Structure formats: C-alpha cells, structure tokens
Amino acid sequence: MAWQQITVITDEKTAPAVADLFSDLGAVSVTYMDAEDEPVYEPAIGETKIWSNTEVIALYELDADIDGVTSRVRQAFDAALLRDWRQELIEDQAWERAWMEYYHPMKFADKLWVCPTGQEQEEPGTVCMLLDPGLAFGTGTHPTTALCLEWLAEHDLAGKTVIDYGCGSGILAVAAVLLGAKVAHAVDIDPQALTATLSNAEKNAVQDKIKVYLPEQLPAMQADIVLANILAKPLCELSARISELVVPGGALILSGILAEQTEQVADAYRALIELNAPTQQEDWIRLDGLKR
C-alpha cells in the first residue's frame, strides 16, 4: 500500500498546532523533524522540545483528499508561518527489514563483532554478538555506544562483575558477558529496555548471566566495572549513586557526553574517580577511570 505525505516547515510555537490539525484531518501519523540541523539537548522527563524551524510531516492514506487537507491547514494559519510545502507519494516497503540497508556487522578493537541476524562473523580470536534494531536504544552504530564497546573489547573482563546503568537494548551487558564477564546487572528506568535486554541476552545464549532491574529494584552491590551510557545531565545528577556502585579500584566508564560537557561531568566524578584523558568520537566523549 502506498501513502501520501505532506511536509511543511514552521516555527517551534506553531508546530504543535499544525500537527494537531493534521491529526484532526485524518493523518495516520505526524512527525517532527529538524529543518536546520539544530541540536536539542536533554529535555526533562515528560517534556517535548522541538526545533526553532521544524518540519511537520503528516502521512495519509492513498485515497485521502490531500489538496483539501492542505487548503484547510493554510486557512487556519498565517501564511508567513508556513513555508516549503511538499507533497509526496510514499511507496510501501517491508519497513521492518529496511534497517538492513544501513546496519552491517561492526568490529570493535579487533575482538568484538556486533552483527545483525544472518550476517554473523566467525573470525578466530573474536566473539560475535547478534543484535537487531529494536524498540530500545543501542545497536553500536552511535558513537556513545561504540565508545563503550571499544573500552570493553580492549580490556580483560574474565571473571569480572559488571553493572550497565541505563542499559537500553542491553548491548553493553551482553557484550561484557560474551567477552568473559562473570555476570552483568542491567539497569534502566524503562521496563521496555529490560525486556529488550533479556531478549538480546537469550538471542546470544547468555541469559543465565544477565540480571535486569529498574533502578529502585537494584540491590545494594558493587561491581568491578560500571558503565553508564546515558546523558550528561543525569550523569551529573546521579554521580554519587553511580560512583557508589564501583568497587574500590574498579573501573567506571561514562558516555553520552558531548565534547562541550566534558568538564561538567568530570567535575562531578573527580572526588572519587581517577579519570583518564577523554576519548572522543565525532562530537561525543567517553570518560573512564578507576575508583580511588
């Protein structure tokens, strides 16, 4: 089945009202996109931040009266607020498999492969983790995750205990176990992330070594290695809690940090963690070090 799509650019104040009107006029989905490459950082829980110039994209069934919808929206708003109108026909495809065009096996530190199902790598001296894109964040393609996977693949994890704080898809917990960790404790505020983690653990036959928790369920414990791939603001807010989870002499790995946020996050951890020089990939930073 094909679909009809309308796109219009407006400002951040007008975009929600335009989106609501598209929905009222029968859109099957409405999406916001950045029209000018303007980053939006760390909205608060329950807050939706959009861009100063936002593309509002409405998808309609093939038999919808697109000209009529466009006319109604134009009539409802000042013409100066709506620009760069586009109408397109979107051909149907197997959307659940479309990601495969962009997601291929990735290798980290000559030791760890992360591969989609059906593209497994069997290279001597390496381990292969099977992971397909899902509803929880984390496939290894983003620099924040890649920086953590590089650290794991570069270190001896044999017999270590690991905490993955903000586990998303569970990619770091599963990778740690495949690389030799004794057990990995995966923590996330989103129950869907815990479900994804268990699914990925089972896919890689390490489910007996992966434990999952909501933050309030995590028992009192410390681990040899603690990874927190979240964002700078929660990293700072949770610095005491995250540092507490590391055994003295244990390793802490922090990611999800933009380069300009490095000192802010480092300052929150320096009292307890001897930090190494930052490691950078694109605009993102990894901080790691040992607990004093």
Image (cartoon, rainbow, N blue to C red):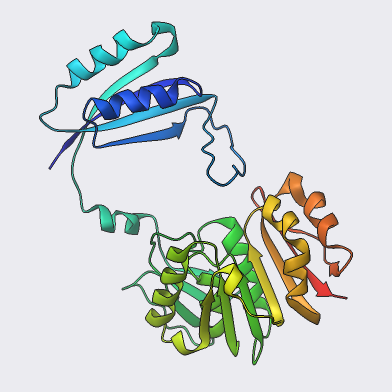
Q: Percent x, y for residue 186?
A: 56, 74
Q: Is residue 132 above or below residue 129?
A: above
Q: Name the outermost residue toward the left.
A: 63
Q: Percent x, y for residue 86?
A: 30, 21
**Depth check: 35 or 202 in front?**
202
Residue displayed at 28% across by 30% down: 23
**Depth check: 18 or 249 in front?**
18
Residue 180 appears in the picture as rendered? no
Q: Is 85 placed left or right of 289 in the picture?
A: left
Q: Percent x, y for residue 153?
A: 62, 77
Q: Percent x, y for residue 25?
A: 23, 25
**Depth check: 285 or 48 in front?**
48
Q: Is 94 placed left or right of 176 in the picture?
A: left
Q: Is residue 1 above or below residue 200?
A: above
Q: Is residue 166 above or below residue 2?
A: below
Q: How many marks?
A: 0
Q: Quadrant of the N terminus?
A: top left
Q: Quadrant of the C terminus?
A: bottom right
Residue displayed at 60% across by 69% down: 216
Residue 51 appears in the picture as rendered? yes
Residue displayed at 44% across by 61% down: 136
Q: Quadrant of residue 85?
A: top left
Q: Is residue 115 above or below residue 86?
A: below
Residue displayed at 44% across by 79% down: 201
Q: Is 29 placed left or right of 198 in the picture?
A: left
